[in-house]
Amino acid sequence: MRHLKLIASFFKVSTQAELAYRSNFFIRLLNSFLSLGTGVLSLVVIFNQVETINGWSLPGTLALLGIYLLLGGLRGLFISPSLESVAGMDGEIWQGTFDFTMLRPVDKQFLVSFRNWRIYALFDVVLALGVLIYAIILLGETLSLGILLSFLLMLLASVILLYSSLLAFSALVFWNSGFLFTWIINDLFQLARYPVGLYPDWLRLILTWIIPVGLMTTIPAQALSGTLSPAMMAITLIFSLATLAGASWLFRRGLMKYASASS
Amino acid sequence: MNHKGGWALIKNTWQSWLQHRGFFFLLAFGWMLPLLVYLFIWSAAAGEGSLAGLTQESLAGYYLVLILVNQLTYSISNWTVGDNIRYGQINRWLLQPMSPLYHSLSSEIAGKVVFMLFSIPITALLAIIIQPRFNLTWSQGLLFIPAVLAAWALRFFWGYWLALLAFWATRADSLLALQDSFIFLFGGHLAPIALLPAWMRSIAQILPFRYMSAFPVEVLVGQLTTREILVGFAYQAGWTVVAFILYRLVWTRGVRHYEAIGG
Amino acid sequence: MNQPMIQVRNLTKNYTVPERAPGLGASIKSLVKPQFREVEAVKSIHLSIDTGEMVGLIGPNGAGKTTTLKMLSGLLYPTSGEATVAGFIPWKRQPDYLRRISMVMGNRSAMNWDIPPLDSFKVLSEIYRVPQQAYQQTLDELIALLDMEALLKKPVRNLSLGERMKCELVAGLLYQPDVMFLDEPTLGLDIAMQRRLRTFLKKYNDTHAVTVILTSHYMADVTALCPRVILIHHGELIYDGDLDTLAKSLAPFKLIKIQFASPIDNFSEFISQFSSVEELPSEQGHHVLRIPRQEIPQVTATLLEQFPVADLTVEDPPIEAVIDQIYEEGSV
């Protein structure tokens, strides 16, 4: 409850800061439409040449694009801005102001995960939902409650996976402050734009088990089309929770490293 | 013009960039990834057959060369022009007995060297994994050099004049994001021009973006007839002249405007 | 409660730093087999500070001041030793502990630069769980004391350095901490602003009995605020006591400033007969002499007897000069 209140307060203040720069509104709007436009046009171009790729048709891939944009929107809404304020360029580790964060009487992981919000990322979220709904209509399926619930559950698992990966990469900054580890995961996230099944085997294995960006969009898309087995669903859920636990552990180790390091 | 001062600046910039090579390797990695995505997507789409005459091997060859050409022609310095104007760095440059263009050019040259240190080994490694096929001839190789130089000049000056609009509008650099999107769609990134739908192909033919990135690649890997190569060079030369004139125009007007409002 | 607010026993901090000889060969070697060196930043320090005390932590750069401050605030684990602050072990960083301390640094900002200070304060009050009413009351008091009503609605990035420092202080005191760690709070401020902040700290300490540990390069901060100083050098605590005694024990010298009624030719010759007297550069027509305390009566008498003295004063050397001397000599 207290944490929810804090989140509300963080959201309010971040939004205020963002609204202070009016030009940001138009630029963010432009960028949102650009990423939507290039994403949709890409699919149009690809499926103009072929009917299906490895069993994926236009509607299924479009649904996956919707999920990709949705995850990207959530990432841009608070995960990235919050984590980057610690580990990014000009972040607290670089500037040396992380000391203040260390001294706040609040759980540090909570603090660094939720304190910065970018309200304009909601454009991305809304557009993504639009794409997703349109793709579901194209798929022509009637969504049963079971499918909808399993989709939402897998979407949640994906958000957890995404958050955990970013947290883990951000935590590495405690060991090497000069490197922008979060950029790597941001770059690799682009690979989630397409079903992981379209990539060569070696890459598919990496994207599933080592840096699980491949799972983040493919699994919810499969859940939506009803082709995901309950076993796979359970595995994904367990895997995402395990990743969360691992990332939190790494982050705590990072804090300990920080507290024993030189000045 | 003070060319000696320019060269000293280039050497200096290069040294400082080398010290931050981790950062630039990351940037290079980020630019490489979208191209890799579409390399894999089109390879999967082509399967064992071919699309518009392009097989998996020739698609791989096209994209690997494009990765290098894209990094050679991508102008990172365009992104800092706006900031330099906004934060008054330009004042110092205007007082130096040397064209401010040198500051951008020095980052360009220094940057290319650092990026290539990363990109060439990575592309070579990828070539071993995915086994591209080329039909290289001497004449194609010889024509490739002017094509890639002109592509760089065109992309640099096009981005430069857009960035210089920052004299009037503070966030002009969002136009650079727009330019990147157009290069993605019409510059052969999303798909080799031959795979685009007819309407996009004809747009790509006319707009400058293809001549900033895909054209040299098409020349090198032998996708073009002699006639197409000649027409391409004509377009490329024409657009480069236009870009240079626009740069001169915007620069002189911009400086006058800047001096008039007192910075 | 008679227990001291801050109690420190045997506090020690060693760092391991990688050591590498210059040159390419050495760099490659250090990749394979890195060499480390132990650096003792703080060596077995004992301290006890009572509630409401204002203590100046002084010492040259690299003496271990910041390391000590960071261990006491909870930012660093010590290598060995114990400390309790307000009854807590700092480096466990329990929320109840963190709510009772605050850290203000002159060279780092805890404020969000894009929004007005008032909004940052509000968020902080929620992080520290300050009840609404208490928050308003504390805020009003601090704003009045610091005279900063006008700053509250401007984004922090538009504030001057001094105005920003006022905000940092409010941010650090909003939740009425019992202990305050001030690390170079007046860094880079002009003299007037330095004086204003000192007055504020003095007043706040009088009314709230907050315990303060202050580090500063400006001795004026320390002399104005801290009756007690702790001197650290090479990680060792070499003095703990009041400032005047430190100055006296450190500076067994006084300065004599003399002005003569008419020019004197053989003054230098006269000086040279006392081996322990040193002539310093003259100030505004006054000759300045540095003389051991015990020789003052004799030298003064001789001067008055032999020369047409128009004006003569005996002064303590400025504290900065004394401190500089310790920093250079490295002992008391």
Image (cartoon, rainbow, N blue to C red):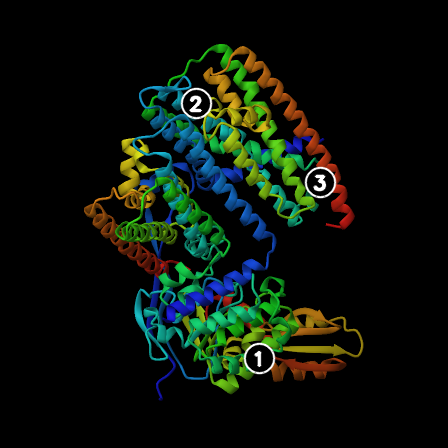
Visible residue check, residue C234? no
In this picture, is C330 found above or below B221? below
Residue that badge 3 annotates: B96
Does residue C83 appear to the left or right of C324 in the view shown?
A: left
Which residue is at a point 53% across and 32% down the rendered structure image? B183
Same chain assignment for discs 2 and 1: no
Earlier sequence position, callout 2 versus callout 3: 2
Which residue is at a point 37% across and 54% down the rendered structure image? A174
Residue C108, numbered label = none
Identified by mark 1, the residue type is Phe
Residue that badge 1 annotates: C200
Outermost right residue: C262
Residue that badge 2 annotates: B62
Visible residue check, residue C93? yes
Identified by mark 2, the residue type is Tyr
Disc 2 crowd rating (10 Å Cα; few below 14, some 14-19, many 20+) is: many
Q: Residue B53's spot in the image, x, y percent?
A: 41, 17
Under tag 3, what secondary structure? Answer: loop
Under tag 1, what secondary structure? Answer: helix
Outermost left residue: A231
